[in-house]
Image (spheres, grey):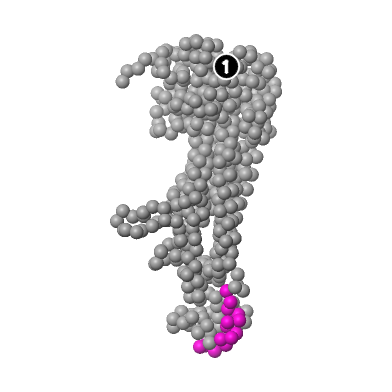
Amino acid sequence: MTYKVRTEYDSMGAIDVPNNVLWGAQTQRSLKNFSISGDLIPPEIIHAIALIKKASAVVNEELGVLDKKRRDLIVNAANEIINGFHDNQFPLRVWQTGSGTQTNMNVNEVISNLASKAIGENLGSNRPIHPNDHVNKSQSTNDVFPSAIHISAANQINAQLLPELKLLIDAFDKKSKDWKDIIKIGRTHLQDAVPLTLGQEVSAWRDQINTAYSRIKGSLSELYSLPLGGTAVGTGLNAPPGFGQKTILELAKHTSLPFTGSTNNFAAMASHDGLINAMAQLRMLSVSLLKIVNDIRLLSCGPRAGFGELILPENEPGSSIMPGKINPTQCEAMAMVCTQVMGLDTAVAMAGSGGHLQMNVYKPLIGFNLLKSINLLNDACRCCRIGMIEGMEPNLEKIEYDLKQSLMLVTALTPQIGYEKASTIAKYAHKNNLNLRESAVSLGYITEEEFDLIVDPTKMI
């Protein structure tokens, strides 16, 4: 296929760029040099970079280093990008330079060309807005790109993940309250244990997610700290005094999030510990969710040859060969998501430790994995809540049957007759296919009346 091209220039010389795109020379070089998989820089990061460009233009004009006409052109173009009108103009892969420089320039070039287009100049002319001299003024990729990851991650956590987790917590809380009087047998080591209520069992799931919610919310304090204004290595070279703080205040105003400047730009730019911590809290959420869905699929296994204590919604056929089979598919989808996030966290942890001196060169990977994990967990929690949690019901008949058959109710006798005799009752009952009451009376350790008074599941929870 042939297409028309225009010639654009950067510090390395001329390169042909398709005439129907808004990006420029440096983006085109990156497309050529880093055609690695189909993983694109997330649009959330692109929008955050555009927001930084907008805020920077406003502050640069306020500080007298950018004229009002150029400010307005940059702001208007950035707004179009922020609103998603040009998402197809950001084709660069995650697997590029580790600083994200080419993506920063991709945004700079698109803004420059949008400005040219707005006043009738040719694309690629860099008139009246130059990608470096004007759009990137007072900035470096080294402070812009990590700041964009912070902004996009904080926004996604606040706008999506935390509200969804709250809904999941509420769903578990309702089940816990609805099932507070359903007494069932507990299990440790996957073996029968003493009783608890189904409501108590579900309360553990609720509070695991509640704790994960608090951990993730706590990690936001580091995400709200931005290294913007540090420029290349943290010193703020080529940025006018006050640029960083003023720009961050502008970002806080536009996002309604409490962004502040880093206490030490050298630390914030040479390493990304705040991002690594946020990712670690997503891993912890995944650990909790995986434990919970594993519990649910154990308790629902059957329906006739397993635990069968929970009845899950029947959402779709479960087998292409076994008619009528229904599987715990929401559990399985969640389990895969959690496993994926744990793997992504390992990559982020290694990336966070891989910085050298004043630069960590794993920024695109960290941003990609962090945002992918937020989105995966948000979607999985929503599907799991709507498709399973809200609709699951207890199998009262099976729960009652298992409770009456359990040998571990004998634990209630221990204070009266001692551990050894109670153990003998349980073993004798199991060997001779008796219930505990029959076994205790047969061995002469206790009367029927005493047994009924002591071994009462309602007193054991």
* Residue 317 shows in this picture: yes
Q: In this view, does 319 lie above or below 158?
A: below
- Mark 1 belongs to which amino acid? Leu
Which of the pair 427/253 is nearer the observer?
Answer: 253
Residue marked by disc 1: 73
- Residue 256 magenta-highlighted: no
Query: In the image as oriented, which residue stretches furthest toward the left?
Result: 321
- Left or right: residue 36 versus residue 205 is left
The image quadrant of residue 455 is: bottom right
- Would you say 303 lies left or right of 134 here? left
Provide residue 328's location: percent of width, then percent of height: 42, 56
Q: Position of residue 331 (x, y in %)?
A: 45, 53
Q: Position of residue 451 (x, y in %)?
A: 57, 83
- Secondary structure found at label 1: helix
Q: For the C terminus, which image quadrant?
A: bottom right
Which residue is at 55% across, 69% downward? Answer: 183
Residue placed most toward the observer, 303 or 10 = 303
Compared to 301, does 16 lie above or below? Answer: above
Residue at (55%, 23%) from the top-left corner? 78
Q: Does the magenta stretch include residue 448?
A: yes
For image coordinates 65% across by 18% down, the residue present is 60
The span shown in magenta is 442-457
Spot occupied by residue 198 in the image (x, y as percentages of width and height): 55, 64
Magenta stretch, main secondary structure, is helix
User: Which residue is at the front of the view, 285 or 266?
Assistant: 285
For the residue carrying disc 1, how many other residues have a C-alpha within 10 Å: few (<14), some (14-19), or many (20+)?
A: many
Quarter in which the N terminus is drawn: top left
